[in-house]
Image (tube, rainbow, N blue to C red):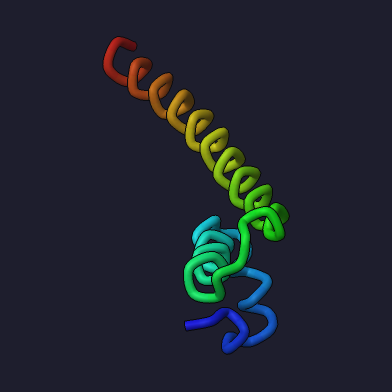
Amino acid sequence: FPVEFLPKWLQYFSHLFPMTASLELFRSIVIAKQSISIHLDLVLEILLLSGGYLLVAMICLKILEKKLVENLFG
């Protein structure tokens, strides 16, 4: 269902997930038959959030890998 139905504080929280912008972009393009060029802000939001989460995941993976190696090999 649309984010607009959520409480205001939860609407802000929902924008921390790339899926929110992706669904909004999908609805605009497929249902409303709008061009992707007028939604470049959503495309940028998706790319930045996805890239940010990818970076955090890579850092966490390196930290966990280091801890695992230390635990296994002393």
Q: Position of residue 48 (x, y in %)?
A: 65, 44
Left or right for 19, reference 9: left
Answer above or below: position of 36 versus 20. Answer: above
Q: Which of 7 and 25 is in front in this view?
A: 25
Left or right for 41, reference 5: right
Q: Position of residue 57 (x, y in %)?
A: 48, 36
Report the residue at 63% width, 51% height from top: 43
Q: Nearer the viewer, residue 18 or 74?
A: 18
Q: Where is residue 29 in the image (x, y as percent from the top left)?
A: 54, 65
Q: Quadrant of residue 10?
A: bottom right
Q: In which quarter of the image is residue 21?
A: bottom right
Q: How many marks?
A: 0
Looking at this view, name the residue that lies furthest to the left.
72
- Locate the C terminus and report the quarter of the image it occupies: top left
Answer above or below: position of 72 versus 51. Answer: above
Report the residue at 70% width, 52% height from top: 40
Q: Position of residue 71 (x, y in %)?
A: 32, 20
Answer above or below: position of 29 versus 56. Answer: below
Q: In which quarter of the image is residue 20?
A: bottom right
Report the residue at 46% width, 23% height from top: 62
Q: Which of 62 and 46 is in front in this view?
A: 46
Report the residue at 62% width, 84% height from top: 4
